[in-house]
Amino acid sequence: MFANVERLPADPILGLIEAFNKDTNPNKIDLGVGVYRDAEGTTPIMRAVKEAESLLLQSETTKAYIGSHGDPAFGKHLLPLVLGQQSPLLERASLTQAPGGTGALRLAGDFIKRIDAKKKVWLSNPTWPNHQAIFKAAGLETASYRYVDTESNQLDFPALLADLKQIPQGDVVLLHACCHNPSGFDLNQQQWQEVLAVLKERELLPLLDFAYQGFGEGLEEDAWAVRLLAEHLPEVMITASCSKNFGLYRERTGAFIAVAATADDMEKVRSQLAVVARSNYSNPPAHGSSIVATILGSQELRPLWEEEVTEMRERINTLRQDFVKALEPHGLAEKFACVAQQKGMFSYSGLKPQEVERLQKEFGIYMVSSGRMNIAGYNQQNLEYLCTAIAATCK
Ligand code: PMP
């Protein structure tokens, strides 16, 4: 059987990492990979996480299974972080721990497929490429709605709204709750209200991908759209990830959340999720969720963690402003002004594929061919080099 297996191309980002590692240019910059980097260019373990781990090492008494829905303490703390402390939504919301945001999206896909296999999942164009792959693997059809106008490199809100209005009743619409990946363009509150009105009118089922809580404007501020939709629609699905805001990438920590119309519906959905999780991987991994539960439940560690999230967010936002400022002397501040307004770790820079290629070949600056940059990939030391290279490439 193996001899007949088709060899598939590697993920383009892996190719980029490989090329970056081989590059001998001492000034090389990696803006491709999707992890947060600090000023030293590393992805450190957060201090609150280190402390929680050391507490766990002392206090953990068993490695027995944690159950298909995961660690109840994790759910108890994460649900209010997403939906709001003391929110009335908590009474009709169910959380199932999952292996990362990716695992949560797969649970969502499998759940939709079990309940109504004909439902299509509508994705923004562009979106995180794994979205398509995950829903396809779950046996669902995907389609796209417009999001970015590639000519102007701006959010195309009228097109987005027009496309949402064409989606058949009952279909699933995946929306990035904040910090849109790959573009960095987020909707403002007024635009979310307009999206809400269309979702309501057409009875569409939103799936909010919430992978960057705390990276846009703040932990509470970033949850605004999630809470708006959950409060005003009978049913909402949310996938949360602790990869970025707890820096737990490899610990695979995330959650699928369903907010149902009634507590009774919520219990029915919850029973389905247990079956979906069991047939996928039985139980989620426990280390990351124990860390999250320990931090969120601790009066000492929670403020420390919040402070660290603020540090990461502010570093990114400062880098965004500084990037545009550093392009000013090159006469390019206006062309790249959007970078200062975008949110989260990623930016659609507006650089064209041939410019991206030149940046890589001539300057050792690596980014995805769409022109997506990881803002946390550069620092104050190499910002000047980056902007001079961009200026040389764009002229
Ligand atoms: N959704 C989006 C939009 C993402 O960017 C990511 C991570 N790159 C994820 C979900 C999944 O993250 P993870 O599985 O690492 O938690």
Image (spheres, rainbow, N blue to C red):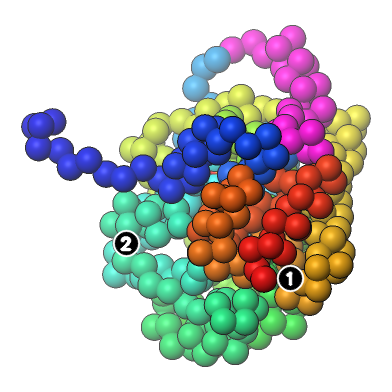
Q: Is residue 339 visible?
A: yes
Query: Residue 31: where, in percent of width, then height?
Result: 64, 48
- Which element carries disc 1, helix, strand or loop? loop
| The image quarter in which residue 26 lies | top right
Mark 1 / mark 2, whichever is N-terminal: 2
Residue 54 magenta: yes
Residue marked by disc 1? 336
Classify 10 Å Cα crowding around label 2: few (below 14), some (14-19), many (20 and above): many
Part of the protein shown in magenta = 38-62
Which of 99/7 is in front? 7
Residue 279 is a magenta residue: no
User: Residue 17: where, in percent of width, then height?
Assistant: 52, 39
Q: Give the residue drawn at x 70%, y 39%.
A: 27
User: Residue 173: image x %, image y %?
Assistant: 49, 71
Closer to the camera in the image, 318 or 166: 318
**Callout 1 amino acid:** Phe
Instruction: Give the amino acid at mark 2.
Output: Leu
For disc 2, the marked residue is: 140
- Residues 335 and 111: in front is 335
At x 62% / y 82%, what residue is drawn?
152
Q: Is residue 127 visible?
A: no
Q: CA distance from mark 1 to mark 2?
A: 37 Å
Quadrant hosting residue 201: bottom right
Residue at left offset 61%, top offset 45%: 364
If the image is split into quadrants, where does the N terminus sit? top left
46 relative to 245, above or below? above
Mark 1 or mark 2: which is in front?
Answer: 1
